[in-house]
Amino acid sequence: MEPHRVEEILFSKVQIRKRVDELVLQMAGDCRSENFVMIGILRGSFMFLADLVRDLYEHDIHPRIDFMTLESYGSGTESSGTVRITKDISVDVTGADVVLVDDILDTGRTLTYACEHIREKGARSVKTCVMLDKPSRRIVPFDADYLGFTVDDRFVIGYGLDYDSYYRELPYIAYITLLQKEDVP
């Protein structure tokens, strides 16, 4: 693991909770389908999806839930540019209204690929919900249907987001700075 330092906290636990509640209010009207499925894109979305589902329950909305794992980063901080499925969904989405949940919308490649994949599996509709958006990094034109926060082009961690599999457990979202070898004590 490279030396690094957690910088400023962007969004506190309280701010995240408030924004999740607001997103669920936006989503509630669209999620009353008899065949409603939420699919979390692992690993980064797990905390976000859990909070969304708990809030949807309070609105008497009960989705079927599944996960898929898509990989484009490996252990680095830059996207490789190639998206591949490492774990596909197991639930049948034929005729379903699907919401794909992801931690961050960056280049647009991953969510574009995931949406096309779910449509090919027969979903009636596919919408997306992301916690964070980095529009300055967009390579493939893509806008999420439901968006938590917009962030600058810096590496973020916490609330499911990681740096080389560390920091996912943090209850807040923060910037991380990689230190040069000469900066390490």
Image: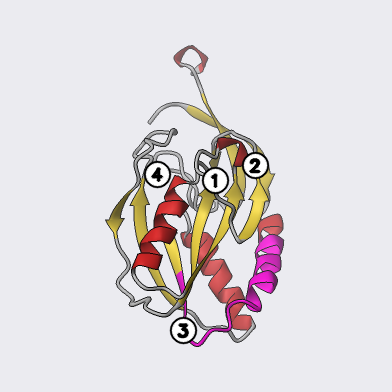
Quadrant where the N terminus is found in the figure:
top left
The amino acid type of the residue labelled 2 equals Val
- Which of labels 4 and 3 is toward the front? 3
Mark 2 sits on what residue? 151
Write the residue at 65% across / 64% down: 20
Rounded to the nearest angstrom, the CA distance separating label 4 from label 3 is: 34 Å
Q: Check residue 110 in the rendering and tell me which mark sits there, or answer none.
A: none
Mark 1 sits on what residue? 141
Mark 3 sits on what residue? 35
- Indicate left or right for 62 with 95 as reference: right
Nearest the viewer among 83 and 167 is 83
Mark 4 sits on what residue? 165
- Label whose residue precedes the other's in the sequence (1 or 4): 1
- Label whose residue precedes the other's in the sequence (1 or 3): 3
- Label whose residue precedes the other's in the sequence (2 or 4): 2
Element at label 4 = loop
